[in-house]
Image: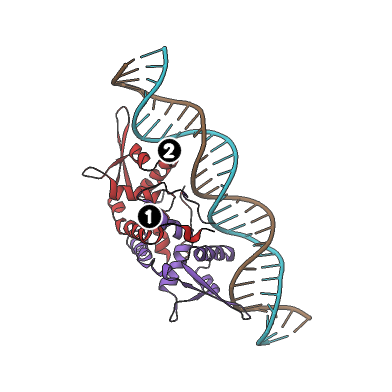
Chain colours: A red, B purple, C brown, D cyan
Amino acid sequence: MARTRHRSLDCSPGCAVEATLQLIDGKWKGVILYHLLAEAPGPDGALRFNAFRRRMPNVTQRMLTNQLRELEADGLVHRTVYAEVPPRVEYRLTARGRSLEPVIRALKAWGDAHAMPDEATRAA
Amino acid sequence: MARTRHRSLDCSPGCAVEATLQLIDGKWKGVILYHLLAEAPGPDGALRFNAFRRRMPNVTQRMLTNQLRELEADGLVHRTVYAEVPPRVEYRLTARGRSLEPVIRALKAWGDAHAMPDEATRAA
DNA sequence: CATCACGGTATCCTTTTCGACACTAGGGGT
DNA sequence: ACCCCTAGTGTCGAAAAGGATACCGTGATG
């Protein structure tokens, strides 16, 4: 479901840039990763499905599921299902996911510094 | 033409992350910025339209134009047109664009370290 | 006269993405 | 008997993104 981008590695050497973008592209993945990195409570930083929903009220269930599943397929997030009723599912970063921290922080820092005040700069 | 993403800032505080992603999202913008940051020759790091085309052979003219125009609209790239024949147009980063350097470098570094060797990791 | 270089536009069409909305299971509470 | 809770899934349809292809002006060159 992720943007297909270029499957043949046709850019070089900027390709690594695109390879990384491909993983965190997808309209909500950036925020999901940010919440897992910086917001998760508890010792191991796990978040449940509805915890995400509370943090991101405008994401539909279907989209949230999709984005989480893609992050899981990319090996960035691990999904733990507890066989309980009502169901309980916890999401936490994998080591690979945690390694994205400098990237997410760079994105956050830039956004805070250059984009957040208002976006009237480009109000067409 | 860029992905619409969320226009109401409905995520917080991960919003800054998305705000930044929104600017460099767009299938080729990452590579374009990378080339402008790291590859541009000359003292002021300008690249001409066909210089991009040579570096990214698989991008169509239309897409390249679109991506460059969006980067220009976002204030990341400046476009200089010389009234000559044959036409000459140079693209260079604005100060705002140059400020993205740590972000691009983080993306590149992660890609080199975690994604480039092969992507058979997730070959489904 | 024809062709090339350059930096694009214009059209058309397909693929991808995303949002709305309805629906599910199964135990516990009232 | 009925509703609530969690963590989803299914289907539909609109909108956006992106690819293919053809076309443009103009001055220099062959």
| Residue extending furthest toward the left | A43
The residue at the point 41 percent across, 48 percent down is A28
Q: As drawn, is A92 to the left or to the right of B3?
A: left
Q: Is A51 placed above or below D5 here?
A: below
Q: Position of residue B103 (x, y in %)?
A: 36, 63
Q: Secondary structure at mark 1?
A: helix
User: Are labels 2 and 1 assigned to the same chain?
Assistant: no
* Residue B60 - label: none
Mark 2 nearby-residue class (10 Å; few <14, some 14–19, many ≥20): some
* Front in this rendered view, residue B63 or A39: A39
Identify the amino acid type marked 2: Gln
- Does any portion of residue B101 appear in the rendered image? yes
- Where is mark 1, residue-wise? B16
The residue at the point 41 percent across, 51 percent down is B123
Identify the amino acid type marked 1: Ala
Quadrant where the N terminus of chain B lies?
bottom right
Q: Position of residue D10 (x, y in %)?
A: 49, 33
Q: Is B86 placed above or below A28 here?
A: below
| Disc 2/disc 1 C-alpha distance (Å) | 22 Å
- Where is mark 2, residue-wise? A61
